Image (spheres, grey):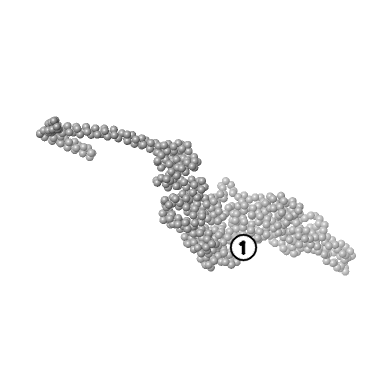
Amino acid sequence: MVRIILFLLLIALGAAGAAWVAEQTGDVVLSWGGYRIQTTLPVFMLALGIVIVVAMMAWAILRGLWLTPERLRRNRRERRHARGRHAITQGLLAIGHGDSTAARIHAEAARKHAAHDPLSLLLHAQSAQLDGDREGAQRAFRAMAEREDTRLLGLRGLFIEAQRADDPVAAVMVAEEALKLSPSSSWASHAVLGFCCAKGDWAGALKILDNNQSAGLIDKATYRRQRGVLLTARALELEKVDRDLARESVMEAVKLAPTLVPAAVLASKFESEAHQTRRSMRLVETAWLAQPHPDLADAYAHVKLGDSARQRLVRVETLAAKMPGHIEGALAIARAAIDASEFTKAREALAPFIAAPTQRVALLMAELERTEHGDSGRARAWTLRAVRALHDPAWTADGYVSDRWRPVSPVTGRLDAFQWQTPVAALPSDKGPAIESSAFEEAMLATPRRAVVLEPPTPVVHEPAPIVPSPSAAPAASITPAPAAQDNAPPPAAAAEATPTETTLAETAPSEAATPSATAPVPSPAPAEPAPARPAPLFRSRQDIPKAVPAPIPAVIPIIRAPDDPGIDEDGPADEFAEQIGQPKAQAGGWRGFLSRWGGN
């Protein structure tokens, strides 16, 4: 509306001006050389306007003719640039959905129409990477690194190509160059920090960490945690070289990251050596409440040097009570209880975890069976179960499982990547039971314990005592041998050794000893043959005893409990069975060893 009003005003002003000129009187005379022009003022003004318009039109025509070549060149450049942009867009889209052929075609078109465009270089490099052409990708990234506007992008590409070529030296050199150009570059600082940690340059790593915090790449909490990790790594490395610097580093680390397990363990050790027991215990308790760990339990148990095994057990029970029901506390109690010969407490601690044992639980049960009862069969069964048992937590980072804590991940170089957790590959599947017990383990663990009675190592011969005839006895008569069911009855001393948990032949044999009949006539004194040595009984019950035993019972039958290695029997019928259960043939012990394992274990 305003424009219309202004336009009407201009028209009105023009009409008023034209009317004013028309009303003017007088003539206008132009004299130029021999020419003389005389006209009125309105005609002169009209002629002047026409001349001005014609001049303007002529100037426009001439200027257009003069600028036509440049306009044509500019239009051509714009068309090429538009084609290049279109090729770059389509090429990047082709790379996005993995079409290497289309990406290569569009990269060639972009190079032809927009060779100096940074995105054209990027498209060419990425299409070469998609095709697997590493040399072409490196050439493109080098061209980008030589330009001022794409230098960091080119260095990043060269860094990635060096990593793919497994050239850590070149990768670190490129990262250091990028870090000089841009201290706030996160990927460059991450790479250089990982390299410093890998070569043990803790001072350089701490300097880079400070630069990251100054550049705002990490927050304050992350900075404190990562600095504690680096200081702990330096302390662990200098523990046996420079103990003063190691102690100073780990004390600062435990202040910055009090829940870091390696820092708490090492700091507790230094405080214990300095006889600062309470401070040492507080350090371990703080880390234990955040993450129970076997190293923390061991450090807590040995916080006082020279303590007895029972004192360590009491201390470990105190620590485990702070996290009731946790498996690490139960394992720590079981370990300390076995060392203190408190086998009942060890079994009570492991009882809630026996239904689905982990490897450490199974190994502790094997050690408990071997230490408490000397039962090598059950110990071997628990050891075999440990092979297929659930995995215990371990230091894990990016799928890599380590036997010790490390400051950075060896896979990605990430700082503070290791966590105490169950490895992902060891987690059970939902398609079925993860762990299945073998028939041998079930048979060995279901068999009740039996006393093992073996043949004495050397034959024992006892001279019979001389028999004094009674005055009222009848003349010569032979001694009536005892019934066959009593031939294998052990002497009272052997029967007294049987424990309540052991089933022996002494429990099934008659209580009375095989002695001569009270009414039988006593023979006259005569030189008697020494009784031959007899092996100890090898049968589980009375049904296995032969019906007739020809030789009489010697005066003393020594009973020897089976050792862990019964020895080698030349008969060797149990070699195949020994191979099936994974035991060397030399320890099978023939058919006697076979019976002793199934009867005694």
Residue drawn where x is 47% and y is 56% of the image: 205
Q: Is residue 179 visible?
A: yes
List the single residue furthest toward the front.
33
Q: Which residue is mark 1?
A: 339
Residue drawn where x is 47% and y is 36% of the image: 101
Image coordinates of residue 267 in percent, x first then y, are 52, 63
Image quadrant occupied by the N terminus: top left
List the single residue furthest toward the bottom.
471
> Which of the two residues, 568 or 512, is positioned nearer the viewer here?
568
Image quadrant occupied by the C terminus: bottom right
In the displayed structure image, the side of residue 549 where residue 188 appears, left or right: left
Residue drawn where x is 56% and y is 47% of the image: 430
Image coordinates of residue 520 in percent, x first then y, are 85, 63
Image coordinates of residue 279 in percent, x first then y, are 51, 66
Image coordinates of residue 445 in percent, x first then y, are 66, 54
Q: Label 1 amino acid? A: Asp
Residue drawn where x is 66% and y is 55% of the image: 380
